[in-house]
Amino acid sequence: MTAKGRETRERIVRAATELVAARGVAGASLDEVRVRAHVSKSQLYHYFADRDDLMRAVARAASDDVIGGQAELFEQLDTIAGLRAWIDALVALQEARQAKGGCPIGSLAGQLAEHNDRARLELADGLDRWEAGIRVGLERMAARGELRPDTEIGALAQNMLAAVQGGLLLTQVRRDPNQLRAALSGALNLILAAHTNP
Amino acid sequence: MTAKGRETRERIVRAATELVAARGVAGASLDEVRVRAHVSKSQLYHYFADRDDLMRAVARAASDDVIGGQAELFEQLDTIAGLRAWIDALVALQEARQAKGGCPIGSLAGQLAEHNDRARLELADGLDRWEAGIRVGLERMAARGELRPDTEIGALAQNMLAAVQGGLLLTQVRRDPNQLRAALSGALNLILAAHTNP
DNA sequence: CGCAGAGTGGACTGATCGGTCCAGTAACGA
DNA sequence: TCGTTACTGGACCGATCAGTCCACTCTGCG
């Protein structure tokens, strides 16, 4: 695959990802993707086996975007202040979006998980990376002796990720970003309860 | 509307709800609904304005099913043992379903919330009723003096609902019912922390 | 009984969809 | 330079979709 081909493929995935974000998986037709990416029908089928394969690539791209967009915040997740800053950033993003759209990964999960197993695995990988980002922060905190020795770090990270996803769903349905803040506050309380200097 | 008409309308909604659960909102065509409900096309449009209107009715029916299916469990939500029994029942249901499908309300939310506002409001109503069920149990617990006086009961109920939704999403994507159990354990820990007799 | 309106059946339409096909062009290695 | 392969354009197809239309039957009520 040449540089030109790689660039074309990337343009298709980006166009499809934007369209799916705007109209949902079912509402994004290949013709619309084709127009937006300035590409012909045959190119779509040159780079992707079929629609499901393109959606798998979209799931991958959405995961990369979500995780990549938090990269710098992940670095600070080893202090309570850093966790609060991360929470504030997630809530601020939802406020900016007027509580619409939810989480790209969570939203795609509801649309793809049951009928596109390869896409489901991409989303699972995205969630794994997300949870790992949280867990690594907590582990650094524990390494500095700031968490009780019996703390189940993996469980705390999983609880936080579940709070993110659940909070985002409530935010989306209720059109209220405070739903996310409240859910994340709850998960943060669990961490504070394990913290030696609360 | 006669009894016969009401029965026909209900048959349509039930058929549509089952089909949506099996194939998703986009995968459920009106023709399939028509066949499954033993009904003609014109009847669909006699009882519903258009496809969105039918999906709104599906959202309503799914909410009623989810809340109604927990009615007896809600009664016991005023004790820690009752909460544990409720958690066990939710996890057992996911195990029986092989972690597929997620929560009907949450799943529909991802598919309908952004493009069908009336359906979104039905789902919000379902979530409200769900959260109220949890909150009422906690309030009874508080009325018996089993929760610290400064406990924010509303926040605890919201945290639990977020844990349900987030846990179900993780369960669905990872195909692992323990994801739900872990998320609910976290939310239960928040309640236990406020309990006077832990 | 008689009739108005609720309820029903199913053919039909125009649009759109995912996917195929083939011809042609650009790029790259030998 | 030449042949091979990657890449591109767009017409085309069969299937399916949501939604329309009209003729017909049933049902409740005065």
Image (cartoon, coloured by chain):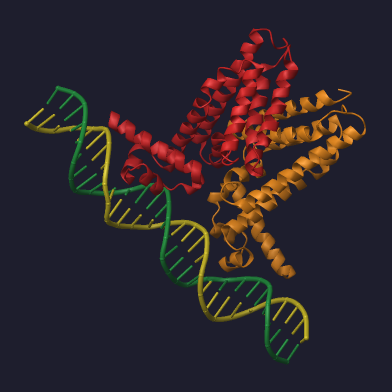
Chain colours: A orange, B red, C yellow, D green
> Where C28 falls versus A177 (above or below)?
below
Which is nearer the eye, B144 or A23?
B144
Report if residue A177 is visible in the image: no
Residue at the far top: name it.
B144
From this view, report whether residue B88 is shown above or below residue A76: above
Q: How many numbered discs, if any?
A: 0
Displayed quadrant of residue A140: top right
Where residue B25 appears, x then y in whole percent?
50, 44
Task: List x then y, in percent, for residue C4.
Answer: 18, 32
* Screen quadrant of the C terminus of chain A: top right
**Quadrant housing residue C14:** bottom left
Q: Which residue reaches farthest right?
A: A144
**Which residue is found at the position 35% from the left and 35% from the top?**
B9
Q: Quadrant of residue A160?
A: top right
Residue drawn where x is 40% and y is 42% of the image: B50
Q: Is residue B33 visible?
A: yes
Left or right side of B181 for B29: left
Q: Picture coordinates of residue A194 (x, y %)?
A: 83, 25
Residue at 77% x, 28% y is: A188
Q: As displayed, is residue B146 above or below residue D27?
A: above
- Between A33 and D28, the one lying in front of the other is D28
Tell me which residue sits at (69%, 60%) in the image: A10
Q: Position of residue C10 (x, y in %)?
A: 27, 51
Quadrant location of the N terminus of chain A? bottom right
